[in-house]
Amino acid sequence: MGSCYSKDCTSTRSESTLKNQGEKKVRPTKEDATADANISRAAHETIPFPKNGIKLSYLLNEFIDECGGREALEGLTTTDVCNQFVMPATKDYELSYCDMILEKAKSKRKLKRVVKTATVFISHAWKYKFLNVLDALEDHFKDEPDKIVWFDLVSNNQHKGPELPYEWWATTFKDAIEQLGHTVMVMAPWNDPIPYKRAWCIFEAYCTSVTGATFEIAMSNNEHKAFIEECMSGPTDVINKMLSIVNAEKSEAWNPSDKERIHSVIRNEVGFAEINSMVFEQLRDWVLVVALKELERVEIDTKDKADLMYLVGTLFKDQGRHDEAEPLYKECLANREEIQGQDHPDTLESIHNLAYLYTNQRKFDVAESLYMECLAKQKTILGSDHPSTLHSMNNLAELYHSQGKYDEAEPLYKECIAKRETILGPDHPQTSISMNNLVELYKSQGKYDETESLMKQCLVKREMILGSDHPDTLTSMNELAGFYFSQGKYGEAVHLLKQCLAKCESSLGLQHPHSITLRRNLEFLQSSFRSMS
């Protein structure tokens, strides 16, 4: 959002802020409060949203030329471009850049076609390098170079910035997002996205979600390639890393009053957990759309196509959409066997992934057969201590455990833990996973003292290594809560499960299978607690 509505850029705003900090504070009277309310209502009712946008092709060409070419803009942020170029250019008019063009167009007809009512809202952080933003938009709209974009730098008046009330943001701004119907967020770098740390960008994403507008993410061509390549090597870890950055309550704004107004809207309308959930869902859906487009682009059977099938299948699997993941995993396996050979590590990975999916679908017999085949080949080809071999060993133990074959599961778990502690280290996430699995086995065997000790140890390690909101950490919290309940420690169980549910809904979404399961667990636990009381 732009500085006309007090975003992060204008020098006039910072000067007035500095002056206000030096003034003596006076307690407001009742009359002052009434006047403020009237001003807020008047602003809400009379200040319209500036609807003018500009042709993207104009920004990419004529605007850059007006600023002195790409060389003059190299290294400058959007804030820098506002202060060094846009504000001086529009100073005599005291209008937005778009409105200035319309004013000039009264004598130059050609200019009039450059500015029209915008059809897409551009969300971006003003800390970004300006040329990187334009490059991302150019790549995103390569098939629509003349798209009329609402770009705050040029759509907003950078000379006049009214302090707009809560009602304006909750209605006028949100209505404008709905009318535009299309939001594109510029993201860079993909592995540390600034927009998800900025209150403005999160609020814009929220308005897009609640109004049902289309949401897309724009990246430069290089960022896009790097993102897809990283996803193909481990999509679950990549997505979890991106999601861990999003926390609406910790989002910042250059102007503290902006942050407070935005946070006020969020608190009053949905709450921070719900807005986090909305943003997570947008991000996950976008990643899936991008991956599907990449898959459609590859027409012949190649290694890249097999890797993309693995990526899309894993994205479906992580959303609990197992039936949609299965055919992709099967085709990926068939392609890898044909292209890379039956004993290639990638082929063995596909066998393992399909076995894991079948386990989630409770197709235990076919899953066990695949795990046994995979583990035998991995021991021969990769070695008994290879991380992939240990991964299959751990998951085969999980399968035995889920079938009640405790005697087969326990030695595999213990062997896996011992080797992972030696090879990966006692604090490695994979070591923690094996420990947590042994905890579950001990519970099933009735070894309760060993269970509680190992569960606490596992939870502490996961919080330290992965963070308190990571899915694996939440799994440990849920399981410890369940154990407390089974041991009659009802207060501890309810308290821990409430924490776990809040974090899960925030990080994974309200409708994720894990969130649904946790809600059911909490309802059952509370109902049982009440009946016992």
Image: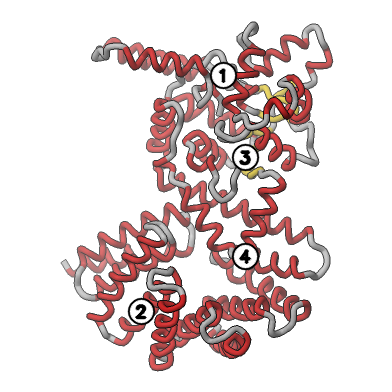
Q: Nearer the viewer, mark 3 or mark 2?
A: 3
User: Neighbour class for label 2 at 10 Å: few (<14), some, many (≥20)?
Assistant: many
Q: Label 2: state its secondary structure.
A: helix
- Labels 1 and 3: the sequence-earlier one: 1
Mark 3 — residue?
A: 186
Mark 4 — residue?
A: 233
Q: Amino acid at mark 4?
A: Ser
In the rendered view, would you say 402 is above or below 153? below
> Residue at horizontal 60%, vertical 30%?
77
200 or 482, nearer to the observer: 200
User: Neighbour class for label 1 at 10 Å: few (<14), some, many (≥20)?
Assistant: few
Identity of the residue furthest to the bottom in this view: 407
In the rendered view, would you say 297 is above or below 486? above
Q: Amino acid at mark 1?
A: Pro
> Residue at horizontal 61%, vertical 9%?
94
Whether the residues at callouts 1 and 3 have beta carbons within 8 Å, the answer is: no
Mark 1 — residue?
A: 48
Alpha carbon distance from label 3 to label 2: 43 Å
Q: State the image quarter where residue 318 is shown.
A: bottom right
Alpha carbon distance from label 2 to label 1: 59 Å
- Labels 2 and 4: the sequence-earlier one: 4
Q: Amino acid at mark 3?
A: Val
- Labels 3 and 4: the sequence-earlier one: 3
Identity of the residue furthest to the left in this view: 533
Image-based side of 110 in relation to 416, left or right: right
Residue 440: mark in rendering = 2
Q: Amino acid at mark 2?
A: Glu
